[in-house]
């Protein structure tokens, strides 16, 4: 049997990463298509259908029993209940911001996420940043500060999205589970809340399934929209360096930014323009700084 070359494996990894970040980048179009529903109902459906997709994959990989056994470990259950709440809150805020014409501000949050990760790494895990990374953090925070007097005032959506997703990463570091079983356990623990919400919402889960129209299929497809980019990202993280992955990740918020600005005509005030210029400058410094690391680092 022929073993794939390193170049072929790396190329597939890059393709997987680009596809994952592309799918995440165009998600605003998907959520806009579901704009007839409140964001809370969309997220409840997303949780349930992601649960169905992820546990189907775990069953196919014969890892479902192993994952369920972690429910007997109180420490793992507590950490994944907390990480699930952080992830669910992040999802809810992102969908809400999309449906309320705040796509550009949400994109800012995901631009800021790596810088928040570096701050938490420094504060909580004694990780050291080089001088360029410290400068990039300062420039990124300055870019946020400029938006305090922007068209929407304090950019709380961007900060809340960056903070919640960075805290999610912090909590996930406390668990030994990989990305697929970890997310499977998180959706399982969130499912009672989602089912409870769908039982009192209108339309309820049963009403939605009974209707079986185009919107029903869109709601059910939220599971695939959640799982597909995560699985592609997981493959990329195992096959390409952190350097490459760290640079490619900015494709997602860039697409979100362009969709909000060019397709939905969200305001690009002077404050926002200067802010994003500083953010992109910080990203350029960040990308240059991680190029100085060992190129063979592999994501966990």
Image (spheres, grey):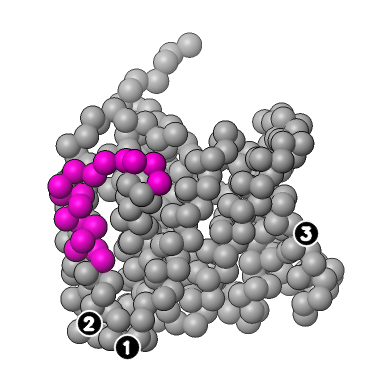
From the top left corner, tell me how far across and down residue 168 is, in percent: 51, 53
Disc 1 secondary structure class: loop
The residue wearing badge 3 is 192
In the image, taking residue 127 as reference, residue 195 lies left or right, namely: right
Disc on res. 271: 2
279 and 29: which is toward the camera: 279
214 and 205: which is toward the camera: 205
The answer to whether the residues at label 1 and label 3 have Cβ atoms under 8 Å apart is no
Disc 2 secondary structure class: helix
74 and 179: which is toward the camera: 74
Figure check: 181 above or below 202: above
Q: Earlier in the sequence, mark 2 or mark 1?
A: 1
Q: Quadrant of the C terminus?
A: top left
Please report the residue visible at 21 percent of the width from the left and 61 percent of the height from the top: 138
Find out whether residue 224 is within the magenta segment.
no
Figure check: 140 above or below 155: above
Q: CA distance from mark 3 to mark 2?
A: 43 Å
Disc on res. 216: none
From the top left corner, tell me how far across and down residue 211 is, in percent: 80, 73
In the image, taking residue 257 as reference, residue 207 lies left or right, namely: right
* Secondary structure predominantly adopted by residues drawn in magenta: helix
The answer to whether the residues at label 3 and label 2 have Cβ atoms under 8 Å apart is no
Disc 3 secondary structure class: helix
Residue 91's quadrant in the figure? bottom right
Figure check: 6 above or below 217: above
Span shown in magenta: 124-141
Q: Earlier in the sequence, mark 1 or mark 3?
A: 1
Residue 130's quadrant in the figure? top left
The residue wearing badge 1 is 151
**Local crowd at mark 2 within 10 Å, few (<14), some, or many (≥20)?**
some
160 and 104: which is toward the camera: 160
**Residue 27 visible, this angle:** yes
């Amino acid at each position: 049997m022929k073993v794939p070359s390193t170049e072929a494996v790396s190329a597939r990894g890059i393709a997987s990463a680009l596809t994952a970040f592309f799918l995440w980048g165009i998600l605003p179009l998907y959520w806009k298509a579901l704009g007839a529903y409140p964001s809370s109902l969309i997220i409840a459906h997303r949780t349930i259908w992601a649960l169905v997709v992820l546990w189907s994959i775990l069953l196919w990989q014969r890892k479902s029993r192993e994952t369920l056994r972690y429910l007997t470990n109180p420490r793992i259950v507590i950490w994944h209940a907390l990480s699930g709440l952080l992830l669910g809150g992040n999802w809810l805020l992102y969908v809400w911001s999309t449906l309320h014409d705040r796509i550009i501000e949400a994109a800012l949050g995901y631009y800021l996420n790596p810088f928040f990760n570096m701050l938490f790494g420094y504060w909580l895990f004694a990780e050291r940043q080089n001088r360029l990374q410290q400068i990039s953090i300062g420039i990124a925070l300055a870019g946020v500060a400029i938006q305090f007097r922007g068209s929407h005032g304090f950019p709380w959506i961007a900060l809340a999205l960056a903070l919640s997703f960075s805290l999610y990463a912090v909590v996930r570091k406390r668990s030994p589970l990989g990305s697929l079983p970890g997310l499977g356990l998180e959706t399982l623990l969130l499912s009672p809340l989602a089912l409870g919400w769908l039982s009192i919402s209108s339309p309820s889960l049963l009403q939605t399934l009974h209707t079986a129209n185009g919107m029903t299929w869109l709601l059910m497809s939220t599971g695939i929209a959640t799982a597909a980019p995560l699985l592609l990202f997981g493959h990329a993280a195992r096959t390409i360096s952190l350097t490459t992955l760290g640079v490619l990740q900015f494709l997602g918020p860039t697409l979100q930014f362009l969709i909000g600005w060019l397709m939905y005509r969200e305001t690009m005030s002077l404050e926002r323009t200067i802010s994003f210029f500083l953010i992109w400058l910080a990203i350029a410094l960040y990308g240059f700084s991680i190029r100085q690391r060992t190129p063979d680092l592999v994501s966990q």
